[in-house]
Image (cartoon, rainbow, N blue to C red):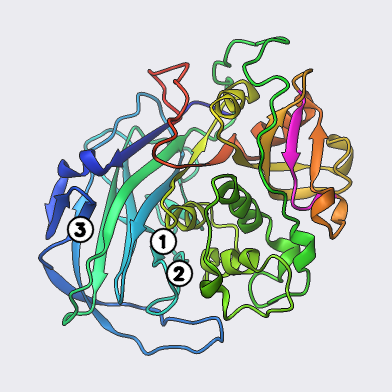
């Protein structure tokens, strides 16, 4: 990890605060109550069959978060949201930042999203680089030599002008981090051989992305690139969550584990052309009732706290073939799941790319702790997907002054 990071989320009770522009706080979450204007959606909806829909005009309302000063400088922001978008409704999440807490950048779009593909194409927005900030798919990035001290989020809720559909937001949050080279963040106290999850392995069903090679290549070249949706599927499967059989009718019935194809389509980012949008993966997981968000953890010691609480993680790693013993491949960016730790503290993973062997039986692998932590922390700054039912509590945070969840 290059520098400090913190996570902040507004859940149902918190969404009564902030600034409401045609939205209202309800026991179910933030809803579109009284639209304040109309706007055109600049891109068309595209279903699994590739059929484009015409551009349309939508009524909108918005909620703006309070200003957040995390207590450290930061150069990166990644949002998360949990929402329902019935009928013709959809949402857009935006962020703005400030160097000094007084002068603010413009608002930058960090995702246009809906639960289904019926109304819009889920997409990030390209061409958003200027002197204030730049957008890299799901991440707001500071220009060179700039660091920020504060941020705000904004969510815009949409529906057709004559519609009664009610989009609802249950969680809106962001993790911010300083990704510039510099003194490392303070590490959690080493646990030696007495970590809380040593010898604990969670029952997480293993799924291989390799089984889906060549399937639906129009979505990020098919299964060979579906590490993120396959990992998200495993996190949902831990809790018995995921699409019902009747939702899978459009997936070729000859394909194995068709719910992985389903997930790949529902996290596919049209502008990015990939299924690895971190925010979209969390939003997809949340459609099944889980709370889901993207954060950055500082170490495997923190990951052990989640495993001890019964919550597996999906994490982003980068490594060369000789840097992670037993992987059998190299990657410039890959998602896999942490499902436990062996008695020596090494990492038990369900790795969907494991050795390029097209079998769910070959997904489980144990990786050296030090090698894995380096691939995770240096590769992505500790990026992790957290997916858990609301009734399953998150672990107690070891550093409440700098929360990561």
> Which one is earlier in the sequence, the residue at label 1 or at label 2?
1
Q: What residue is shown with label 3?
A: 31
**Is residue 195 inside the magenta stretch?**
no
Q: CA distance from mark 2 to mark 3?
A: 20 Å
Task: Give the number of callouts.
Answer: 3
Q: Residue at x 25, y 64 (%)?
A: 157
Q: Which residues are magenta?
A: 346-354
Name the residue beneath numbered marker 2. 122
Q: For residue 41, which quarter of the picture?
A: bottom left
Q: Name the residue rendered at 35%, 24% in the picture.
A: 71
Please tell me the numbered disc located at residue 323: none
* Real-space Cα separation, disc 1 to disc 2, in angstroms: 7 Å
**Disc 3 residue crowd, few under 14, some 14–19, many 20+, Cα 10 Å:** many
Q: Which residue is mark 1?
A: 111
> Is residue 203 depicted above or below 42 in this figure?
above
Image location of residue 104, percent across then percent down: 26, 45
Callout 1 secondary element: strand
Which quarter of the figure is the N terminus placed in?
top right
* Nearer-the-camera pick, 258 or 246: 246
Q: Secondary structure at mark 2?
A: loop
Q: Kindly indicate whether the residue at mark 2 contacts the one at mark 1 (C-beta within 8 angstroms).
A: yes
In this view, the residue in front, 18 or 291, is 291
Q: Residue at x 23, y 51 (%)?
A: 28
Work out which quarter of the rendered image holds the C terminus and state it. Answer: top left
Image-based side of 341 in relation to 189, left or right: right
Question: Of circles 1 and 3, which is in front?
Answer: 3
């Amino acid at each position: 990890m290059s520098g400090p990071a913190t996570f902040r989320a507004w859940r149902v009770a918190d969404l009564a605060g902030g600034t409401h522009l045609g939205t209202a706080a309800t026991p179910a979450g933030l809803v579109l109550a009284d639209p304040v204007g109309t706007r055109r959606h600049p891109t068309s909806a595209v279903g699994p069959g590739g059929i484009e829909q015409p551009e349309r005009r939508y009524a909108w309302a918005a909620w703006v978060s309070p200003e957040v000063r995390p207590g450290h400088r930061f150069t990166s922001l990644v949002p998360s949201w949990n929402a329902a978008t019935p009928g013709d409704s959809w949402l857009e999440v935006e962020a703005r930042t400030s160097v000094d807490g007084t002068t603010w950048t413009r608002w930058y779009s960090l995702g246009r999203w809906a639960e289904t593909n019926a109304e819009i194409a889920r997409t990030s927005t390209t061409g958003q680089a200027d002197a204030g900030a730049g957008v890299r798919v799901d991440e707001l990035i500071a220009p060179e030599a700039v660091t920020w001290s504060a941020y705000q989020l904004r969510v815009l809720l949409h529906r057709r002008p004559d519609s009664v559909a009610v989009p609802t937001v249950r969680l809106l949050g962001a993790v911010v981090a300083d990704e510039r080279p510099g003194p490392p963040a303070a590490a959690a106290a080493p646990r030696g051989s007495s970590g809380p999850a040593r010898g604990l392995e969670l029952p997480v069903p293993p799924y291989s992305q390799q089984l889906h090679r060549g399937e639906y290549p129009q979505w990020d070249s098919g299964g060979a690139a579906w590490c993120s949706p396959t990992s998200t599927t495993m996190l949902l499967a831990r809790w018995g969550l995921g699409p019902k059989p009747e939702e899978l009718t459009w997936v070729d019935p000859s394909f194995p584990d068709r719910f992985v194809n389903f997930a790949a389509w529902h996290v596919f980012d049209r502008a990015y052309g990939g299924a690895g949008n971190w925010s979209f993966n969390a939003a997809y997981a949340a459609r099944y009732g889980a709370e889901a968000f993207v954060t950055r953890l500082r170490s495997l010691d923190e990951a052990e706290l989640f495993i001890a609480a019964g919550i597996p993680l999906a994490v982003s790693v980068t490594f060369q073939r000789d840097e992670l013993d037993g992987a059998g491949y190299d990657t410039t960016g890959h998602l896999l799941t942490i499902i436990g730790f062996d008695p020596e503290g090494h990492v038990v993973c369900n790795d969907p790319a494991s050795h390029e062997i097209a079998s769910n039986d070959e997904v489980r692998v144990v990786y050296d702790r030090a090698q894995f932590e380096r691939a995770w922390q240096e590769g992505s700054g500790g990026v992790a997907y957290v997916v858990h039912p609301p009734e399953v509590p998150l672990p107690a945070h070891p550093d409440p002054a700098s929360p990561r969840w």
